[in-house]
Image: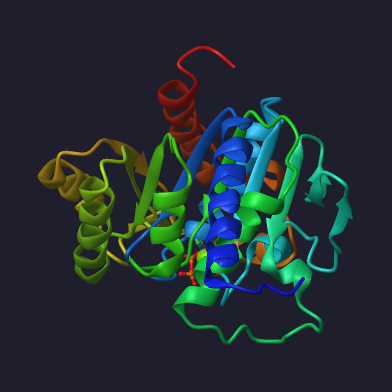
């Protein structure tokens, strides 16, 4: 459709904002997973959180707004899926029972094609995700964000209203803490609740000698939470199978539910569930 005037463009953008409000109000709860730092485990945690909710029989969606590095489809083993549309909008991909997925990865013409977009185009794409996707009746939507305080997390924080809150991921390293502090302050500045901080990659137990080795340190996430006066959700260890399972599209919570990381993760999921659902579905 050709847009003739600035006036018409404004009208269309206004209509899109109204549609976003309507679509988001149809979803029970919305949670964003963020971090100021890259590579700390945001996508791993987003995927396992969504799978855990789905296993608990919540109708769950996961939206991957990491436009430059959309890892969610691969981590769920559905990277070759293709999006379909209906008169009600784009239909997300069904990953498994109770779990629907949306990612820019499903829209790329060829595997490995990069997204080379500047700010306004990225904001526009995310708003289109929010306005054009027909999620149906979801109990909860988990949004995996790229690192930092740029266009993508900012668009999510400003466009999803109300957002139940943000799960902030850090590692015990000081450099991660410094970047996460900025991200926490951005979220606080927008008056959006922080559901809590997770310290990922916190200690490693050698599978041979069973000695604990603190590869990146330990405990800094809790200290940061206290300093910033936000809840602390818990820590997750480095575990050898996590990366391999993730590469094979098998979330650890489902693949290895008795592992140390899965047990610790389920405690964190219960805390998030209590905060978000408050005993009601
Ligand atoms: N607790 C863990 N134990 C072992 N490996 C982990 C753990 N958490 C994450 N990883 C691995 O670390 C790498 C980075 O994780 P992930 O991609 O989830 O981080 P991210 O914060 O989403 O990164 P990005 O900023 O690039 O989006 C992946 O290879 C993942 O499998
Ligand atoms: Mg990621």
- Horizontal side of 107 relative to 277 (left or right) equals right
Using the image as rendered, state which of residue 108 and residue 53 is in the foreground.
108
Q: Residue at x 46, y 47 (%)?
A: 32
Determine which quarter of the picture holds residue 36: bottom left
Residue 165, position as x, y percentages in the image: 39, 38
Q: How many marks?
A: 0
Q: Quadrant of residue 85?
A: bottom right
Q: Residue furthest top?
A: 279
Query: What is the x, y in percent for residue 131?
Result: 64, 50
Position of 17 with respect to 53 (left or right) is left
Q: For residue 71, which quarter of the picture?
A: bottom right
Query: Is residue 61 placed above or below 66 in the rendered structure?
Result: above
Residue 65 appears anywhere in the view: no
The residue positioned 89% from the left and 49% from the top of the image is 86
Question: Of 224 and 69, which appears nearest the observer?
Answer: 69
Quadrant of the snapshot with the N terminus: bottom right
Foreground of the two, 77 or 260: 77
Q: Is residue 1 above or below residue 13?
A: below
Q: Which residue extends farthest left? A: 227
Task: Answer yes or no: is residue 112 visible.
Answer: yes
Give the colour scheme of this rendering.
rainbow
Q: Quadrant of the C terminus?
A: top right
Q: Nearer the viewer, residue 121 or 34?
A: 121
Task: Residue 112 in the image: state x and y as whole percent.
Answer: 72, 86
Residue shown at 50% from the left, 67% from the top? 123
- The image position of residue 263, as x and y in percent, is 52, 35
Looking at the image, residue 68 sits to the left or right of residue 251; the answer is left
Image point 48% across, 41% down: which residue? 31
């Amino acid at each position: 459709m050709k847009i003739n005037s600035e006036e018409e463009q404004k009208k269309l953008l206004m209509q899109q904002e109204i549609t976003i409000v309507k679509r988001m109000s149809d979803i029970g709860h919305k949670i964003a997973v963020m971090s100021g730092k890259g590579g700390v485990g945001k996508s791993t945690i987003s995927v396992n959180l969504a799978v855990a909710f789905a296993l608990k029989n919540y109708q769950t969606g996961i939206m991957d707004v990491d436009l430059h590095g959309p890892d969610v489809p691969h981590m769920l083993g559905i990277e070759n899926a293709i999006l379909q549309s209906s008169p009600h909008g784009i239909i997300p991909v069904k990953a498994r029972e109770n779990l629907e997925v949306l990612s820019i990865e499903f829209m790329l013409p060829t595997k490995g094609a990069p997204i080379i977009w500047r700010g306004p185009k990225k904001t526009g794409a995310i708003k289109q995700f929010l306005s054009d996707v027909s999620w149906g009746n979801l109990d909860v939507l988990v949004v995996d964000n790229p690192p930092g305080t740029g266009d993508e997390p900012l668009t999510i924080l400003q466009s999803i209203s109300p957002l139940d809150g943000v799960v902030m991921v850090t590692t015990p390293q000081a450099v991660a803490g410094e970047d996460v502090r900025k991200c926490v302050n951005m979220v606080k500045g927008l008056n959006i609740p922080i559901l809590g901080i997770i310290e990922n990659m916190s200690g490693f137990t050698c599978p041979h000698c069973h000695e604990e080795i603190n590869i990146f340190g330990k405990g800094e996430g809790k200290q940061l939470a206290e300093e910033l006066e936000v809840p602390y959700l818990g820590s997750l260890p480095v575990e050898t199978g996590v990366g391999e399972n993730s590469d094979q599209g098998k979330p650890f919570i489902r693949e290895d539910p008795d592992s140390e990381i899965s047990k610790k993760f389920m405690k964190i999921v219960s805390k998030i569930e209590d905060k978000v659902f408050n005993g009601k579905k």
